[in-house]
Image (cartoon, grey):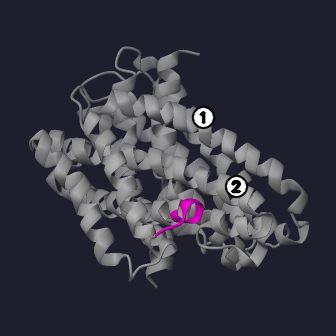
Amino acid sequence: MKKEVFRAAATLMGTIIGAGVLGIPYVVAKAGFLTGLVDILFIGVMMLVLNLYLGETVLRTKEDHQLTGLANKYLGNKGKYIMFASILIGDYGALIAYLMGEGASLSAIFGGKALIWSFVFFFIAAFLVFRGIKKISVSELIVSSLILLTVMVIGIFSIKHIDIANLTTFSFTNLFIPYGIVVFAYLGLVSIPEVKEVLMKDKKEMRKAILIGSIIPIFIYALFAFIIVGVTGINTTEIGTIGLGNYLGSIALILGNLFAIFAMFTSFIALGLAMKETYKFDFKLSEDTSFMLAMLVPLVLFLILKNVATFSKVLNFAGFLAGGIAGLLVIAMTFYTEKLGDRNPEYKMPKNLLLKILIIIILVGGVIYNLI
């Protein structure tokens, strides 16, 4: 397989796998493992389909756009600003959660105040966002490989401590409990234009890159939830890796939190880059202004919310609301891309109206459930 395909898949996977994975075990334990597993698998497939729909839309568009620009082209000015609102909620929510999670994870390993570690992480990640796509895609390829290795090592250390009784619970009425955080954990729509950028000279490989980058997180999430919930059960903590260390000792604490650090690191820089390019390309702002808006806004919001909102609440809110809005707009764009697009795409999704209706029902249902 070509190196560019791996880089493109790593760009998508690096965006997807972030703070969300750390919150999954907590809500899966609350809902029951088998209940949560259904969410992980079903929502994972749904988000894969949305990524492919958006990939076709990107390929039908000559100019480079982030999500807001695409929404403007195919849905008009109102679509642009609705999409921008969803991006602000989702991406800034994600960046805030990453700052919370990184501080807690680094503090769990090295000691000291979580707030100080949040600042250390922020300055390193912000520097990489400033450097741009080539440096970021390379770093994601390396760090994504480390994530896979870390999950496997954690699994080896944990296997003897898994209690099967923690993994047998199912409740149909609890299906929507993990919904918001699981949707959040799969959000990678903002990086689909970056996938095209990585594959600029080989766009026919875009579907393959999206498939790889979307499917691998499904297996990682299922395995991660299996390990954490299997060991810690109903005592699973909001950041799952921290609780694992309480059961398995210092080695597990270090490995688990290294996984958390790697995961949030890749997502932070990928989302930060997407936000910067949204301001730059779609709102025609300067490079420096775009960078400042992409990085300083979430830092300020983090400082405001750090003593008010919990890690899981931030993830859930950003997931069900931003994911719901963005997903609905992606589906809406598919009805106009063939007519308004200005190039032939390298792949085409099947024209399946029932599939689109099913996704719409799930997305709307998730928003309603969490708002009631």
Quadrant of the image for the N terminus?
top right
* Location of residue 221 in the rendering, given as x and y in whole percent from the top left corner: 65, 53
Quarter of the figure with residue 254: bottom right
State the residue position of label 1: 145
Q: At 83% from the left edge and 71% from the top edge, which residue is drawn? A: 166
Q: Residues within 10 Å of mark 2 (few under 14, many from 20)?
A: many
Q: At 28% from the left edge and 62% from the top edge, which residue is drawn? A: 298
Q: What element does badge 1 sit on? A: helix
Q: At 43% from the left edge and 81% from the top edge, which residue is drawn? A: 371
| Disc number for residue 298 | none
- Confirm whether residue 241 shows in the render: yes
* Location of residue 185 in the rendering, given as x and y in whole percent from the top left corner: 53, 56
As measured in the structure, the alpha-carbon distance from the residue carrying label 2 to the one carrying label 1 is 15 Å
- Confirm whether residue 210 shows in the render: no
Q: Amino acid at mark 2?
A: Phe
Q: Residues within 10 Å of mark 1 (few under 14, many from 20)?
A: some
State the residue position of label 2: 224
In-front residue for pair 79/287: 287
In-front residue for pair 193/103: 103
Q: At 49% from the left edge and 63% from the top edge, which residue is drawn? A: 101
Quarter of the figure with residue 148: top right
Give the label, 2 or 1, closer to the camera. Answer: 1
From the viewer's perspective, is 267 left or right of 294?
right
> Over which residues does the magenta segment extend?
107-112
Magenta span dominant secondary structure: helix
Q: Amino acid at mark 1?
A: Ser
* Location of residue 276 in the rendering, given as x and y in whole percent from the top left corner: 23, 45
From the viewer's perspective, is 274 left or right of 320?
left
* Chain-order first, disc 2 or disc 1: 1
Q: Is residue 109 magenta?
A: yes
Whether residue 332 is situated above or below residue 243 in the rendered picture: above
